[in-house]
């Protein structure tokens, strides 16, 4: 699938990938000069050989930091069906950072009535 990238997300985990990562790890290091950075983004499908995605569809996925990307795998790729919010929200509140905040607050923190909670975007 060929896509035109519209919005790219710059997320905290990317900092880890900017250092040398040795041994088994969830993240691999970026290699300067060999390939574009990758991260989550919103893109518009320009050409597709997959029956579930057609020209003009909007998607949210891991993509490269470049104007156009070739996406060969469908793992982690979602079609955007709700366009009644700004598309940039899919790189923040409706994307990976928003899901992380939601899970951290409701699943890990589990605040109780009367407790104070401090939330930071740092």
Image: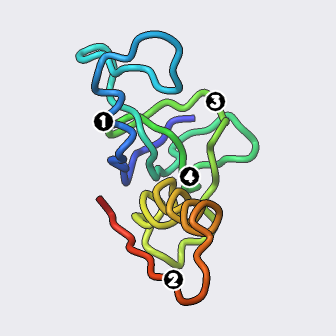
- Colour option used: rainbow
Q: Is residue 5 left or right of residue 80?
A: left
Q: Nearer the viewer, mark 1 or mark 4?
A: 1
Report the residue marked by disc 2. Answer: 115
Dot 4 corresponds to which residue? 59
Spatial CA span between label 1 and label 4: 25 Å
Front-most of 14 and 48? 14
As helix, strand or loop, the secondary structure at mark 1 comes to helix
User: Earlier along the polypeptide chain: callout 2 or callout 3?
Assistant: 3
Which residue does the numbered mark 1 point to in the structure image? 15
Q: Position of residue 12 (x, y in %)?
A: 35, 45
Whichever of callouts 1 and 3 sits on the residue coming sooner in the sequence is 1
5 vs 2, left or right, is left
Question: If you read the primary sequence from the N terminus, does the residue marked by circle 4 or circle 2 appear first?
Answer: 4
Per the model, the C-alpha gap separating discs 3 and 4 is 13 Å
Above or below, comparing residue 117 to residue 5 in the picture: below
In this rendering, the answer to whether 23 lies above or below 82 is: above
Answer few, some or many: residues within 10 Å of disc 3's Cα (few below 14, many 20 plus, some between 14 and 19): few
Q: Residue furthest front?
A: 114
Residue at image position (44%, 76%) is 117
Q: CA distance from mark 4 to mark 2?
A: 39 Å
Q: Is residue 27 left or right of residue 21?
A: right
| Label located before the other in sequence (3 or 4) | 4
Q: Quadrant of the C terminus?
A: bottom left
- Image mark for residue 73: 3
Q: CA distance from mark 2 to mark 3?
A: 44 Å
Q: Is residue 11 above or below residue 57?
A: above
Q: Decide: marks 4, 2 in contact (CB < 8 A)? A: no
Decide: few, some or many residues near mark 2? Use Cα within 10 Å; few <14, some 14-19, many ≥20. few
Which numbered disc, 2 or 3, marks the residue closer to the eye? 2
Q: Using the image, tell me which numbered label, if any, was put on residue 121.
A: none
C-alpha distance separating marks 1 and 3: 25 Å
């Amino acid at each position: 699938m060929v896509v035109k990238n519209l919005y790219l997300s710059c997320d905290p985990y990317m900092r880890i990938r900017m250092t040398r990562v040795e041994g088994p790890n969830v993240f691999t290091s970026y290699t300067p000069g060999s390939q574009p950075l990758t991260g989550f983004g919103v893109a518009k499908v320009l050409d597709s050989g997959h029956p579930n995605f057609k020209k003009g569809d909007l998607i949210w996925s891991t993509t490269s930091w470049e104007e156009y990307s070739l996406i060969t795998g469908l793992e982690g790729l979602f079609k955007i069906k709700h366009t009644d919010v700004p598309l940039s929200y899919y790189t923040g509140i409706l994307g990976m950072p928003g899901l992380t905040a939601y899970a951290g607050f409701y699943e890990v923190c589990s605040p109780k009535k009367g407790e104070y909670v401090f939330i930071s975007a740092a």
